[in-house]
């Protein structure tokens, strides 16, 4: 499958690397492709030689382009931008390029302007997932994977036991497909909890402040929660 | 130990029952003791006969009183009111009665005025834990146990594996004592994570929206999170 990743940072690179390894076509993207390349953002294709090698090995394109390029390229879209830029980036990507597609939103609306740890730009009665779905009514938005760091997203097996990942979104079939394909088949998640419609993104994003404190308390970002239920 | 519980609802009753069973002196409390008794809030002392029996069995007082009565009675104080009423209740309890004491705050600032599920009255850059500590500067406030339902608070062993409980607060010794005594020795928790100062209460209270969606998705409130870390 061809996958367009909106974003070029650490999360985008980690997802792209895994998706390439799985044999998918991947395009990562930036607002300013030249500037991003100069910054060295293209960690997954760090040199022309490695890019060529990856293309040869995979027989598919591992490419970098504008947000609109990635949106047009992908049959599946992943929003891996910083949450504060997500709506602008998706606007630039173009609603027509995203029409009818599934978009997996892994971002958090973190606000670093108040210092560390970040707070949220909005929450409680609103969420980034809801704002993205409202801005893209013809796109099937699924919130997932925003509750952990990028390394755990693509390799849950590095934790010593099964932990939990969530999906939320207004389109049940899109949630089911993301659960079965992206999370389970591709990334190896075994415990996926479907939280229902996109208002559940509020809770998923509001997990971030506790995650950030846990990161400080445990000293590792290789960490996740496991939901345990009784009888 | 004599323990004053601020509150008389389900959480207060469940905690009182367990603390009585452990042999502590307990006083639950209400803004209006007569009204609370008429409502049947005193589930732990449902009749004069049982109250007398409990007193005989325990050799200590299982009593009900005003917020001020409970605050004066307790060597340890637990805030088990609904979050929207916590600050008023603690004001009524009297700062002088709470001076120097440890207060365990198990409440969440839930806002039911917008319908179900509830949102939070405030969050992100503020928390109930911080507001209580600010209102009671001479009281050693420890946020704990607000991340689960009352049954799990006092009986974590009903879940099929060890799950996680948290402490936060500005007084390290108070956090340590609550962790070792209340959580571990009394209630049987084995995995206590110390999140540091009271600003961590933001994350602990912001867990509620996800907990509420999980309650809906799993169909049970006998549920908790386990924090799993890798290397």
Image (spheres, coloured by chain):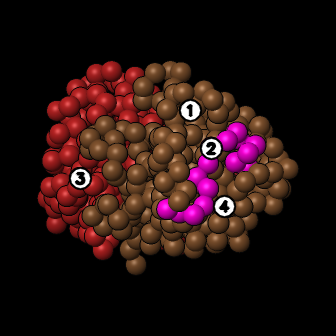
Chain colours: A brown, B red
Q: Nearer the viewer, mark 1 or mark 4?
A: 1
Q: Determine the secondary structure under disc 1.
A: helix
Which quadrant of the structure image shows residue B47?
A: bottom left
State whether discs 1 and 4 lie on one chain. Answer: yes
Residue tagged by mark 3? B231
Depicted A120 relative to depicted A25: above or below: above
Instruction: Give the numbered dot on residue A2.
Output: 4
Q: Judge left or right: residue B176 versus residue B204.
A: left
Q: CA distance from mark 4 to mark 2?
A: 13 Å
Q: At which x and y percent is residue B7?
A: 42, 46
Secondary structure type for disc 2: strand
As for residue A144 lying within the magenta part, the answer is no
Q: Nearer the viewer, mark 3 or mark 2?
A: 2
The one of B23 and B146 positioned closer to us in this rendering: B146
Disc 1 and disc 3: Cα gap in Å? 32 Å
Segment tinted magenta in the rendering? A57-71
Residue B171 percent coordinates (x, y)? 23, 29
Residue A37, numbered circle: 1
- Quadrant assignment, res A90: top right
Considering only order in the chain, which callout, 1 or 2, is on the residue closer to the N terminus?
Answer: 1
* Tag count: 4
Numbered disc 3: secondary structure: loop
Tags 2 and 1 in contact by the CB under 8 Å rule? yes
**How far apart, in angstroms, are the residues tagged by discs 3 and 2?**
33 Å
Q: Residue B40 bears which disc, if any?
A: none
The disc at residue A64 is 2
Q: What is the crowding at mark 2: few (fewer than 14 residues within 10 Å), some, or many (at least 20)?
A: many
Disc 4 on helix, strand or loop?
strand
Callout 1–callout 3 Cβ contact below 8 Å: no
Residue A170 % position (x, y): 73, 61
Q: Nearer the viewer, residue A19 or A54?
A: A54
């Amino acid at each position: 499958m061809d996958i367009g990743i909106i974003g070029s940072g650490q999360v985008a690179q980690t997802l792209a690397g895994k998706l390439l390894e799985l044999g998918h076509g991947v395009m990562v993207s930036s607002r300013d492709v030249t500037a991003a390349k100069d910054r060295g953002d293209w960690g997954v294709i760090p040199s022309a030689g490695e890019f060529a090698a990856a293309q040869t090995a995979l027989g598919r394109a591992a490419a970098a382009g504008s947000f609109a390029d990635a949106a047009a390229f992908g049959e599946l879209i992943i929003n891996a931008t910083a949450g504060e830029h997500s709506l602008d980036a998706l606007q630039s990507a173009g609603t027509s390029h995203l029409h009818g597609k599934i978009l997996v939103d892994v971002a958090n609306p973190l606000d670093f302007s108040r210092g560390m740890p970040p707070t949220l730009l909005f929450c409680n009665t609103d969420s980034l997932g809801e704002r993205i779905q409202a801005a893209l009514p013809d796109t099937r938005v699924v919130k997932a994977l925003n509750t952990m760091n990028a390394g755990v997203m693509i390799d849950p097996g590095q934790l010593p036991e099964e932990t939990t990942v969530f999906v939320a979104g207004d389109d049940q079939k899109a949630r089911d497909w993301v659960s079965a394909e992206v999370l389970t088949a591709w990334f190896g998640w075994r415990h996926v909890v479907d939280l229902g419609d996109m208002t559940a993104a509020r809770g998923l994003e509001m997990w971030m402040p506790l995650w950030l404190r846990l990161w400080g308390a445990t000293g590792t970002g290789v960490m996740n929660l496991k939901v345990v239920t009784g009888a």
